[in-house]
Amino acid sequence: MNENNIISYRLKSLRKELKESQSEFAYNCGISTETVSLIERMKVNPNLDTLQKIAAYTGTTVSDLLKIK
């Protein structure tokens, strides 16, 4: 699985665990809904700032976001 797939998979899994829509998740992370959508659809890789925001909100680490569980 390549990096895009891993990040997309982890983001979608975390969001679904939280039972949040893309817009709710984006708001809570402090990023745009479009960013969440693009990451989940493997259209873009998030930058480090975005990964840090997602990790902080979900109580995980950037390193964990890049791993398949």
Image (spheres, rainbow, N blue to C red):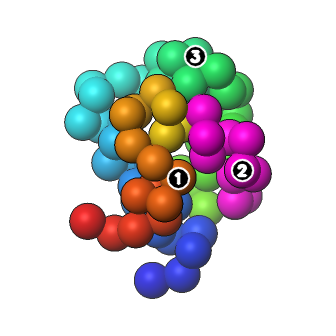
Where does the N terminus fall, quadrant-wise?
A: bottom left
Camera sees residue 43: yes
In depth, the one of 41 and 48 nearer the eye is 48
Q: Please state if 22 lies on the left or on the right of 16 as rendered.
A: right
- Give the foreground label among 1 and 3: 1
SS state under label 1: helix
Q: On screen, 30 above or below 9?
A: above
At 36% from the left and 23% from the top, the residue drawn is 20
Quarter occupied by residue 21: top left
In depth, the one of 56 and 41 nearer the eye is 56
Tally of marks: 3
Q: Amino acid at mark 2?
A: Leu
At 56% from the left and 24% from the top, the residue drawn is 29
Dots 3, 2 in contact, CB < 8 A? no
Q: Amino acid at mark 3?
A: Tyr
What range is drawn magenta here? Answer: 43-53
Dots 1, 2 in contact, CB < 8 A? yes
Neighbours of disc 2 within 10 Å: few (<14), some (14-19), many (20+): few
Q: Please state if 25 lies on the left or on the right of 29 as rendered.
A: left
Q: Where is mark 2, residue-wise? A: 48
Of the two numbered discs 3 and 2 on the same chain, state the one appearing first in sequence.
3
Residue 46 sits inside the magenta stretch: yes
SS state under label 2: helix
Q: Where is mark 3, residue-wise? A: 27
Q: Position of residue 49 (x, y in %)?
A: 73, 41
SS state under label 3: helix
Q: Where is mark 1, residue-wise? A: 62
Where does the C terminus fall, quadrant-wise?
A: bottom left
Q: What residue occupies the far bottom of the structure in this picture?
A: 1
Question: CA gap, disc 1 to disc 3?
Answer: 19 Å
Of the two numbered discs 1 and 3 on the same chain, state the one appearing first in sequence.
3
Q: Please state if 36 lies on the left or on the right of 65 as rendered.
A: right
